Amino acid sequence: MLTLEAVSATLANVQVLRGISVRFGRGATVAIVGRNGAGKTTLLRLMMGCMPKHTGRVIFDGHDLSSLPARGRAGLGIGYAPEDRVLFPSFSVEGNLRFPCEVIGLAQRAVDARLAETLAIVPELEAMLPRSAAALSGGQGKMVALGRAIMAGTKLVLLDEPFQGLAPVLATQYGTSLQRLIRARPELCIVITESNRSLLKNIPSETLVLERGELQRSDAATPHSH
Ligand SMILES: Nc1ncnc2c1ncn2[C@@H]1O[C@H](COP(=O)(O)OP(=O)(O)O)[C@@H](O)[C@H]1O
Ligand SMILES: [Mg+2]
């Protein structure tokens, strides 16, 4: 569904990603593990087509994402929860959840149906719906960002370090929501980055390691020598 072909990316004259070729298939839950600064956020931005300076190709469902304008990408079914969550503080939680679907012009009833499905997957959001997004704790904001990514991401959901800084109770709720999401949408591809892979428990079906700008399967990664 999503294929990266020989993708390299440079930020401020530093090569962050080197020759990455990888395929993300339907129904996979893939972890991308790497230290801070390894390039995880850069890689996710590329996967949603919003990273202009790169070589190679990013193909989603037959569309070359690098040649599509932002408007063309919005309706493709990619949901993204950035690590710094970026909610609209002047909107309610419900407004933030509905926003990406309204932007792509989805009919009201379709948005209602997606909201109902999202609340079944992340039930903690129900009580938060009328609250101002500005009034949320960091962890609550992460739950809302997950909900928003589910609202938009019917095919691909990208989660950037979702467990970082989550209190244990919220981390457990978040993990349970991911399990519900996997069950509710067996065709969905979910990509989760993390610097600390133990936080992911047994959620991913496969793990890739990002190191020095290169992506390797976890089982192929060479162990560090002492
Ligand atoms: N806007 C930017 N300008 C210059 N360098 C950047 C920028 N964003 C990130 N970098 C650098 O690119 C590298 C990869 O960053 P990032 O993708 O954010 O890694 P991660 O998400 O794994 O922590 C880091 O060395 C970081 O310092
Ligand atoms: Mg990052």
Image: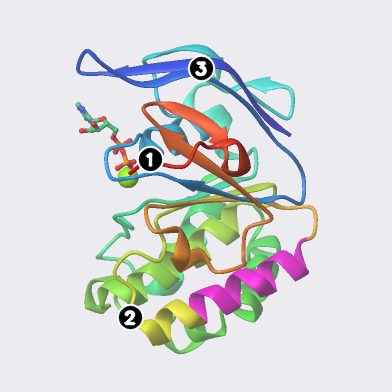
SS state under label 1: loop
Instruction: Tell me the tag on residue 7.
Output: 3
Range shown magenta: 173-185
Where residue 225 appears, as percent x and y from the top left, is 38, 40
Of the two numbered discs 1 and 3 on the same chain, state the one appearing first in sequence.
Answer: 3
Of the two numbered discs 3 and 2 on the same chain, state the one appearing first in sequence.
Answer: 3
Where residue 83 appears, as percent x and y from the top left, is 34, 54
Judge whether 182 appears above or below 57 on screen.
below
Looking at the rendered structure, the kind of residue marked 3 is Val
Where residue 211 appears, as percent x and y from the top left, is 40, 33
Quadrant for the C terminus, please: top left
Looking at the rendered structure, the kind of residue marked 2 is Ala
Instruction: Tell me the tag on residue 167.
Output: 2
Of the two numbered discs 1 and 2 on the same chain, state the one appearing first in sequence.
Answer: 2
Residue 49 appearing in the image: no
Name the side, left or right, on which 220 lies relative to 174: right
In this view of the protein, which residue sits in the foreground, 105 or 22?
22
